[in-house]
Each structure stands twice: as C-alpha cells, then as structure tokens.
Image (cartoon, rainbow, N blue to C red):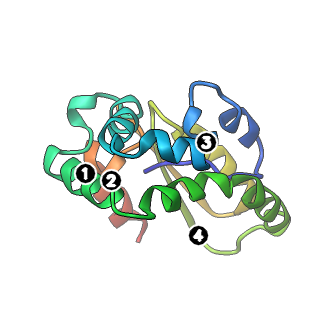
Amino acid sequence: MDAFLPGVGGWETVYNNPGIWHFRFYGAAPEALAKGRERIYLDDLWNNFAADKNRSIPEADRRAYTQSYARPGRTAAGFAYFASFPKKATDFAELAKTKLAIPVLSIGGEKSLGDVLGAQTKLVASDVTVVVLNDTGHWMLEERPEETIAALTRFL
C-alpha cells in the first residue's frame, strides 16, 4: 500500500485531512466500537481507499483479514500503528536531515498518495525512482498486481 512519511515535508496535510479519519481512531472507545464490527471497519478502509472498490481486496482475503483482526489484542495493535504517528513524525523529521545514500523506490497510487509520497521521498533521498500507478488507490498490489511487480522488478 502507499502511504506518507510522518514528519517529512507536507505530512500534516494528509494527517490532518478529516476525510482520512482513521489516523486518530484509536484508544478504548474506538476499540469498543470496532469490537464485533471489524468487517465494517475494514470494508470502509478497503473500499474507500481503492480507486475502484471492485478491484480492491479480494473477498477471500477480506474474510481472512477480518478473522485475524477480530482476535484478542489485534484491533488494539492495529490502532497503535496510527497512534504512533506523532512520535514517528518527530523521529522521521530528525532522520530526514541526512539524505539516504542508496537508491529508493517510491510506488504509489494515482488516486491515493502516489504523488505525495514521491515528493516526500525526494526530500529524504538523493537517488529516487518515483512510480505513480494510474487508476490505482491505496492497495496497489491488489489493484494493479502486474504493474506493481513490474515496477519492483525494474527497480531491482
């Protein structure tokens, strides 16, 4: 999936976007709200962050992910990823002061954060290859498996 780099140029625009509500959906109350409704929560993410929900996460995978996410402690662990963003932003901002001296590949979806991630990556590395997959959302490998694998293969 494509994502942004907390703490690196322009990250606040994405993080503070009210349409991307899940960045601040964590803690006891959200966990209680999601308990027993994991599929509703996950379907919202899978459908709304895809370029086309019909090319998003396949049904068999949705069932498997939902079953796993519903196990004790899994929702809290998943939400903890988003709760960590303010700390990540501090850490990444410090790390970004020294550009990476290795080739870096940035792959993102045109209908998601592909352009944002590409621009951010150029701020933290000198040798950057940016690939933005057309008509693709957040779930690149599921939405455009051949194009994603081709981009990885070309880069490697």
Label 2: which secondary element: helix
Q: Residues within 10 Å of mark 2 (few under 14, many from 20)?
A: some
Residue 145 shows which numbered tag?
1
Q: Are marks 2 and 1 in contact (CB under 8 Å)?
A: yes
C-alpha distance separating marks 3 and 4: 29 Å
Residue at 48% over, 35% down: 112
Residue at 39% over, 38% down: 41
C-alpha distance separating marks 4 and 2: 17 Å
Which residue bears the numbered disc 2? 148
Could you tell me residue 47's position as x and y percent?
A: 33, 32
Q: Are marks 3 and 4 in contact (CB under 8 Å)?
A: no
Could you tell me residue 11's position as x and y percent?
A: 72, 42
Q: Residues within 10 Å of mark 1 (few under 14, many from 20)?
A: few
Q: Residues within 10 Å of mark 3 (few under 14, many from 20)?
A: some
Which residue bears the numbered disc 4? 103
Residue furthest top in the image: 19
